């Protein structure tokens, strides 16, 4: 999301769509691998799944606390440094960002298992989950990229970024607690 916002601020929404497609494909791959791996662990090693669930919830709580403690400074250059990047490079950047993001893996591994019924075939459930994730990812990245130009001036002020970080941090802490206790 941050990459979509940053690119929306610097190169515009239309060019940012290239990055979005790459990231959506990467998120789909991460989701598929996470669901298959977690489903396998959930069915064969329930204790390991519980440990993974608590660790994932704990990690999300840690991330939320880090967001709360953040100084709230926007650290991007608002120059058109990406203006001449080819669409294929932007798509690759999005894909690599999605698959190399440990927070994305932790979030996916922690969030998806409650939506998997081990008594039903995993395949159809996986297709539905991945389609929902891809649609949500596209929608939210579009909102972030579109809002980039408008939010640019507001986010340059330290206090506004800190407020957004605290709201986001609180939500992430809540999800972490829900995952650990749910």
Image (tube, rainbow, N blue to C red):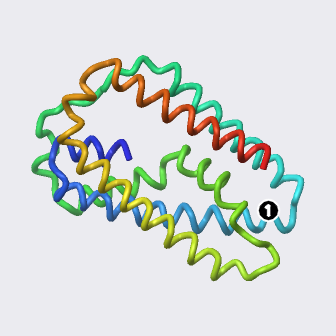
Residue visible at 18% across and 41% down? Answer: 149
* Image quarter of residue 46: bottom right
Residue visible at 61% across and 65% down? Answer: 33
Closer to the camera in the image, 168 or 87: 168
Residue visible at 23% across and 55% down? Answer: 16
Residue visible at 35% across and 62% down? Answer: 22
* Image quarter of residue 119: bottom right
* Image quarter of residue 118: bottom right
Percent across and percent down for residue 10 are 17, 41
Say whether residue 35 is left or right of residue 28.
right
How many tags in the picture? 1
Q: Is residue 123 above or below residue 179?
A: below
Identify the secondary structure beneath mark 1: helix
Closer to the camera in the image, 87 or 5: 5
Percent across and percent down for residue 5 are 29, 44
Q: Disc 1 marks which residue?
A: 41
Say whether residue 32 is left or right of residue 21.
right
Percent across and percent down for residue 114 are 72, 60
Q: Is residue 127 above or below residue 173?
A: below
- Circle 1 Cα neighbour tier, 10 Å, few/some/many (<14 / 14–19 / ≥20): some
Say whether residue 69 is left or right of residue 15.
right
């Amino acid at each position: 999301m941050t990459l979509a916002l940053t690119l929306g601020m610097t190169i515009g929404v239309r060019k940012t769509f290239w990055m979005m497609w790459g990231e959506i494909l990467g998120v789909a791959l991460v989701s598929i691998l996470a669901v298959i791996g977690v489903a396998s662990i959930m069915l064969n090693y329930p204790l390991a799944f519980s440990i993974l669930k608590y660790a994932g919830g704990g990690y999300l709580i840690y991330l939320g606390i880090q967001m709360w403690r953040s100084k709230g400074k926007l650290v991007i250059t608002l120059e058109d440094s990406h203006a001449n990047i080819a669409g294929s490079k932007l798509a690759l950047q999005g894909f690599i960002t999605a698959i190399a993001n440990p927070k994305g893996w932790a979030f996916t591994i922690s969030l998806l298992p409650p939506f998997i019924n081990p008594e039903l075939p995993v395949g159809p459930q996986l297709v539905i989950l991945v389609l929902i994730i891809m649609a949500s990812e596209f929608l939210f990245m579009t909102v972030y990229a579109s809002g980039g130009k408008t939010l640019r001036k507001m986010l340059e002020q330290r206090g506004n970024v800190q407020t957004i970080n605290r709201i986001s941090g609180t939500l992430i802490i809540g999800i972490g607690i829900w995952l650990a206790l749910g």
